[in-house]
C-alpha cells in the first residue's frame, strides 16, 4: 500500500543541497505528496506537502513533476542534523491514514 | 516540538500481559492516529479516532483497541501481548474538517518491549 518508491540510502556533503527523489507513478489526481523525516527513533517530523505545484517552506522545497509521477525533496544547505530517514507518502485528500514505506536514509557527511 | 505527548516513554511487559499507552493531542486537534513501527521499518497505521469514534483501521487484530476522550486525548490498548508487538508506538494528531484531514503531527513515541 506504500505506493511510493525511494532509494534506500543517500549521502550528501555538509553545506551542499540534498536532493531526495521519490517515485509515485500510480498517484491519483486527488492525492497529496507528503514528506516526513525521522531522526533515530524519534517521532516522524513533518517537512512539507504538495498537490500539483512546487512548494517551499523554511525547511525544504518540494518539486513535483508535471505528470505528478515523481517528486524531489530539496534540502538547500544540508547540515549534520539533517541526517535522518526521509519518508515520501501519498495520501488521498479525504484519506485518514498515511502509508509509510521504508524511506531513504540520508547521511550528511562533514 | 509538536505539542503531542505520549506516555510512558518506555515500557517492558511479558508475553500475555495487557498494556495501555496514552497520547495527548496538539491543542485544537480533534483526530488521533496510532502507528506501530518495528525496528528498521516505516510506521504502520493501526487506527484513527475522530470525535471519539474509530475512523479507519489498518491490518491489525482486534486485540489492538483504542479510545478517544472528550478532550481528544487517546489510549491504545493491546491485549494478550506477543513478542512481535515489541515496537515503537507512535500517535499523531491532526485537525479534521468535514471529510478533509489536515497534516498529522507525531509524538515522540512509546518504546514497548515484550519479553
Image: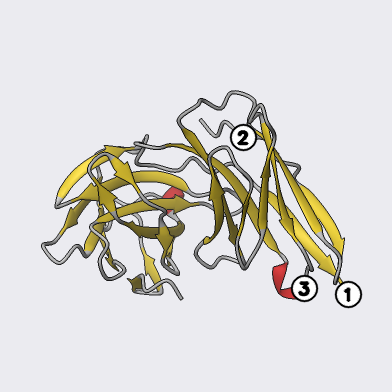
Q: Is residue A31 above or below residue B68?
A: above
User: Quarter holding the C terminus of chain B?
Assistant: bottom left
**What chain is tagged by disc 1?**
A
Please tell me which of labels 2 and 1 falls first in the chain.
2
State the CA–CA distance, disc 2 to disc 1.
30 Å
**What chain is tagged by disc 3?**
A
Please tell me which of labels 1 and 3 falls first in the chain.
3
Callout 3 crowding tier (Cα within 10 Å): few <14, some 14–19, many ≥20: some
Q: Position of residue A65 (x, y in %)?
A: 70, 34
Q: Residue at x 66, y 26 (%)?
A: A67
Q: Is residue A23 above or below residue B102?
A: above
Callout 2 crowding tier (Cα within 10 Å): few <14, some 14–19, many ≥20: many
Q: Label 3, on which residue? A: A79
Q: Quadrant of residue A96?
A: top left
Q: Label 1, on which residue? A: A110
Q: Label 2, on which residue? A: A4
Tag 1 secondary structure: loop
Tag 2 secondary structure: loop
Q: Is residue A35 above or below residue A13?
A: above
Amino acid at each position: 500500500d506504500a505506493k511510493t518508491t525511494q532509494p534506500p540510502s543517500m549521502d550528501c556533503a555538509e553545506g551542499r543541497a540534498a536532493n531526495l527523489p521519490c517515485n509515485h507513478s500510480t498517484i491519483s489526481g486527488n492525492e497529496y505528496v507528503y514528506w516526513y523525516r525521522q531522526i533515530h527513533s524519534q517521532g516522524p517530523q513533518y517537512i512539507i506537502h504538495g498537490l500539483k505545484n512546487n512548494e517551499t517552506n523554511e525547511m525544504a522545497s518540494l518539486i513535483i513533476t508535471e505528470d505528478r509521477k515523481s517528486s524531489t525533496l530539496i534540502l538547500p544547505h544540508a547540515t549534520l542534523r539533517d541526517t535522518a530517514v526521509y519518508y515520501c507518502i501519498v495520501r488521498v485528500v479525504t484519506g485518514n491514514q498515511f502509508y509509510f514505506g521504508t524511506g531513504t536514509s540520508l547521511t550528511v557527511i562533514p | 516540538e509538536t505539542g503531542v505527548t505520549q506516555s510512558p516513554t518506555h515500557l517492558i511487559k511479558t508475553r500475555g500481559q495487557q498494556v495501555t499507552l496514552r497520547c495527548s493531542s496538539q491543542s485544537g486537534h480533534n483526530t488521533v492516529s496510532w502507528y506501530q513501527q518495528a525496528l528498521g521499518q516505516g510506521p504502520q497505521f493501526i487506527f484513527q479516532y475522530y470525535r471519539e469514534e474509530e475512523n479507519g483501521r489498518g491490518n491489525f487484530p482486534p486485540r489492538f483497541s483504542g479510545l478517544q476522550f472528550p478532550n481528544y486525548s487517546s489510549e491504545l490498548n493491546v491485549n494478550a501481548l506477543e513478542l512481535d508487538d515489541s515496537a515503537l508506538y507512535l500517535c499523531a494528531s491532526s485537525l479534521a474538517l468535514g471529510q478533509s484531514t489536515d497534516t498529522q503531527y507525531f509524538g515522540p513515541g512509546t518504546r514497548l518491549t515484550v519479553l
